[in-house]
Amino acid sequence: MKFDTLQQGIRFYEHYARLSGFDTRLSSTKKRKSDGKILLKYCVCNKEVLEKHQDFMQSAKRKEQ
């Protein structure tokens, strides 16, 4: 899906997330080196980091055993 502005895209995803029962947060951004223009902005589920942390902790526990 393509939006005219970054803000329109963010609002769309936040609205979709609320209807689907989860919260969002803004994640990493990719910018053009020459002028700093934003090329890509990631909007992700706010639990993404927690899930990655839990996966890491589970793998660390397996290594200890």
Image (cartoon, rainbow, N blue to C red):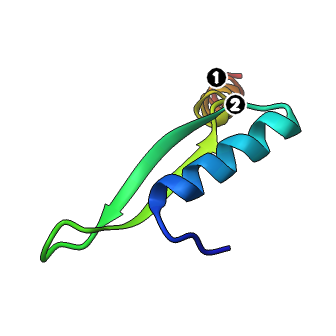
**On screen, residue 57 above or below 43:** above
Labelled disc at residue 6: none
Q: Amino acid at mark 2?
A: Asp
Q: Position of residue 38 (x, y in %)?
A: 32, 65
Q: Residue at x 48, y 53 (%)?
A: 7
Secondary structure found at label 2 = loop
Looking at the rendered structure, which numbered label has been put on residue 23?
2
Which quarter of the figure has residue 49?
top right
Residue 65 falls left or right of residue 27: right
* Horizontal and vertical percent position of residue 13: 67, 50
State whether residue 8 is above or below residue 18.
below
Work out whether residue 36 or residue 3 is closer to the camera in this orientation and state it.
3
* Quarter of the C terminus within the rendering: top right
Q: Which residue is mark 1?
A: 64
Q: Position of residue 6 (x, y in %)?
A: 46, 59
Please tell me which residue lies in front, 10 or 61: 10
Image quadrant assignment for residue 19? top right
Q: Quadrant of the N terminus?
A: bottom right
